[in-house]
Amino acid sequence: MVIEYGGVDGEPPEPIYFRTEYYPAGMVFPPKRQVWGELNYALQGVAEITVEGVRYLSPPQYAIWIPPDAEHDASNRRDIRYVTTYVARDLCHDLPQKPCMLELGPLLKAIHADFAERGIRHPRTEEDLRLAMVIVDRIRSARRFDHYLPVSDDPLVAPILLQLQENPGDRRSLAEFGRLVGKTERTLSRRFQERLGMSFNDWRQRLRVLAALSLLEDGHSVQAISRRLGYGNPSAFIAMFRRLTGTSPKAGRAGL
């Protein structure tokens, strides 16, 4: 069931506005433009936002930055809890001018958690305003990515991406995929780096993280997920998950 969200989507930032919300599966947020910047990241689930026609996916360790005036819409196929920060236009002049992914740091998340615990949406005191400005500084200095899981319509890369998306547990090597498309492993490796900005193995591991988050939310055990994603034992899966997310699958299940 699709539920269109028609509520008031936050308040104008003065100069910053924070909110933490939970939305059930099936929510759809229609396209809109806003005169302020917007930072979104998931506390639980995977955020899915389309900005200027480009779809962004972000697990809890990455945020989606939307600059002022950029058209965006969103939907969530599963339950999600996420944080939104609105930043006044006059504070955005040296923040990213294009939509992008930002790597979240512990300081930014700790300040958000503090505001949420104290129920602060508009910081008013000098102390809280200083904390809010630290968030702006963190947005400015955060490591930027075009996408967490980029896609490509390249005739060599696209069929491989499609097969992996259909089966994230596919264990075939790049050399084996190369034999299917009549190209060497070296050629495909270079094409992945050129078209996606990352290696074949890095892309596949990111895909598996997203798949694992969804399976964890659905209540599957770590053992079952590791088998489904092509790992010989749970320890190898846990090590991969921790390396890419900074936390364990158990903590990921808890939405930490």
Image (cartoon, rainbow, N blue to C red):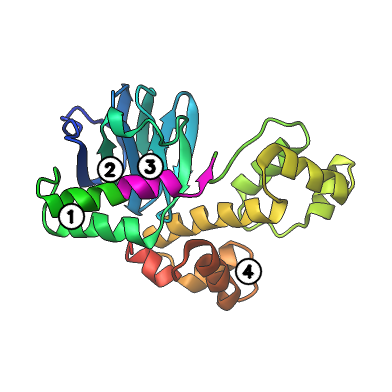
Please identify, in this view, whether the residue under mark 3 or under mark 2 is nearer the observer.
Answer: 2
Dot 4 or dot 1: first in sequence order is: 1
Q: Is residue 141 left or right of residue 76?
A: right
Q: Residues within 10 Å of mark 2 (few under 14, many from 20)?
A: many
Q: Are marks 1 and 3 in contact (CB under 8 Å)?
A: no
Q: Are marks 2 and 4 in contact (CB under 8 Å)?
A: no
Residue to which mark 2 is pinned: 84
Give x and y (percent) for residue 200. 71, 51
Residue to which mark 3 is pinned: 77
Dot 4 or dot 3: first in sequence order is: 3
Dot 2 or dot 4: first in sequence order is: 2
CA separation in Å, label 1 and label 2? 11 Å
Q: Is residue 45 left or right of residue 117?
A: right
Q: Is residue 136 magenta?
A: yes
Mark 3: amino acid? Arg
Quarter of the picture containing the C terminus is bottom left
Could you tell me which secondary element the residue under label 1 belongs to?
A: helix
Above or below — where is 68 with respect to 106?
above
Q: Is residue 143 magenta?
A: yes
Residue 193 is marked as: none
Q: Are marks 1 and 2 in contact (CB under 8 Å)?
A: no
Residues 170 and 235: in front is 235
Dot 3 or dot 2: first in sequence order is: 3
Dot 1 or dot 2: first in sequence order is: 2
